[in-house]
Each structure stands twice: as C-alpha cells, then as structure tokens.
Image (cartoon, rainbow, N blue to C red):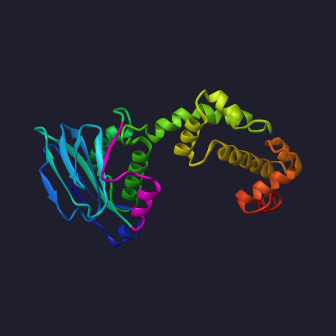
Amino acid sequence: MKQMLVTALDRSLPIFVETMGWNERQDEFNRPQGYHCYHWLQTTGGEGQFEISDKIVTLAPNQGILLQPNASHSYVAQSNPWSTWYITFNGNLAPFIVSSLGLATSTVISWEPGSRLSTLHTRSENLARQSFDFNGMDGSAFVYRFLMDLKRYGQVDNQRSFSQHTERLMPFIRFLEENYSNPAFGLTQLVEYAGISSQRLNYLFRMTTGMSPYQYLIHLRIQKSKEYLINDKKLTVKAIASLVGFLDSSHFVYTFRKIESKTPQTFRDLN
C-alpha cells in the first residue's frame, strides 16, 4: 500500500489521492461503518465476493466497484488468490465530480480488456516505481484522469460505455457537420441517414452529448456562426444566418440570444 502524506495543500485541491495499493492476495474486509473516503476496488486476477447495500456481487477481472464515503460493505476472496488494485480519494469537489460525471456507485462497473482501465493498475505501479508524486497537483490530476477514464470506458448492467456510444455516434456527427448549412436539413434526413429509429437516435445523442439531435444541430449552427462573426467581419448578420442554415435573420438572432445570452452583433463587438 502507498499511503499519501495528505497535507493542507492537498486538502485545498478539488480532489486528492489518499491511499493506493496492490494486493496479490486480497484479505477479507468487513467495514460496517464504511470507509471515510471514496474507495475504488478492482480485480486484477481471480474473483472476489463483494457485499454492499444487502446486495452480493462478484468482482471478476476487468471489473471494479466505486464506493461513496461511509458506505457499509464487506468483501472476501472467491479464488486463491484474489488480486486487487485500489485507490481512495477525497476533496472538496470530489462529490461534485463523481456526481457530474454520472459515475455509478455501489454497483459493478465493467470494461473491455483493451481499454485504459485494464492497464490502470500496471501503469500506476510503474509510476510509483519511478517515484511519481501522487501527492499535490500531480496526484490530483491522476485521480481526475482515472475518473474520466471510468466515465469513458466503464459499463454498468451490460450497457455500452461512453466511448462506445461516442464511436457509434461519430458518423452522424460528421453527417451533421456536412449538412448543417442547409435550412431544409433536419431530423427526418438524419434519421434516414442513420437507418435507426428516431427514439434510438435520440437516446444515442442524449447519452453522448446531453442533447437531442435537433438541439445538437441548433448548437452546431450557432457555433459555426460564432466562427463567421469572429473571422469575417465583412459578413453581415443576415448573410451569416443564411450560411449556417437559418431561413431568416430574425430567427437566427432570437436563437443566438437564447443560447449565448447576447445578440450576434454584441458577440462580434466583444471579440
């Protein structure tokens, strides 16, 4: 186990590493009061049995579990040996980061063998051997990157990971990039191109971008208009509205103000 010297500077950071460890033979643990920090445990070899919230689950290779502070739990080896890697962390913004990323807690998270999560334990071990400083800002960046990878590659209840959703969505994003300037282009054309139902397409977009396909198209048009407003001062607002797929400038100005909280002309003047 690598126990960090948590300083006042560490505690002032949004998130910091408290401990990190590798166990070739994981001992049995029973924590009725839970652990005082966020606690991640993953299997690197064999299998273990994990009990949390009156639920018993198995942790096999390429699987782990994230626990919130003070969550009652216990675990025991189901094979000989059961090998694990763990990290505990906390920080003023740790709850916000975990929540905003939508990370599942107290449930099994799986990942594909080829993802970054499958080599996390070996990478962290190599860093420790190279005297990498897991304290301070470097440690904060390490745990934040880990949580981002957990968001990107983690799978819960056999659902696709964020990265798999993104990969699935990329052809549709490129199609939007190629057609956003056409005012007649809309959801109907996108659904026809996608070859899937509008409900499924909406699910993919919301899982990956937090927006519906139509909302994404509108935001894309506004983003492109901002590029024109900044890069070509000779273009009128009316001309830009036409270039990015709006039928009239009044609708463009209304939509721009709604999204950016300022008119296109004000945005141009400020930039």
Of residues 247 and 92, the one drawn nearer to the viewer in this rendering: 247
Q: Which residues are magenta?
A: 92-111
Q: Is residue 135 above or below residue 242?
A: below
Q: Residue extending furthest left?
A: 80
Q: Is there any visible trace of residue 109 in the rendered image? A: yes
For this view, does 123 lie left or right of residue 167?
left
Q: Is residue 149 above or below residue 260?
A: above
Q: Quadrant of residue 201?
A: top right
Which residue corresponds to the image point at 32% horizontal and 39% vertical from the top-left? 119
For this view, does 135 lie left or right of residue 172?
left
Residue 260 in the image, given as x and y percentages of width and height: 71, 59
Q: Is residue 100 magenta?
A: yes
Residue 54 in the image, given as x and y percentages of width and height: 22, 54
Q: Quadrant of residue 256?
A: bottom right
Residue 68 in the image, given as x and y percentages of width and height: 31, 60
Which residue corresponds to the image point at 37% horizontal and 37% vertical from the top-left? 158
Q: Is there any visible trace of residue 234 in the rendered image? A: no
For the C terminus, which image quadrant? bottom right
Q: Quadrant of residue 270?
A: bottom right
Which residue corresponds to the image point at 25% horizontal and 37% vertical from the top-left? 61
For the N terminus, which image quadrant? bottom left
Of residues 168 and 235, the one drawn nearer to the viewer in this rendering: 168
Which residue corresponds to the image point at 41% horizontal and 38% vertical from the top-left? 159
Q: Residue extending furthest bottom?
A: 8
Residue 113 in the image, given as x and y percentages of width and height: 33, 33
For this view, does 33 lie left or right of residue 156?
left
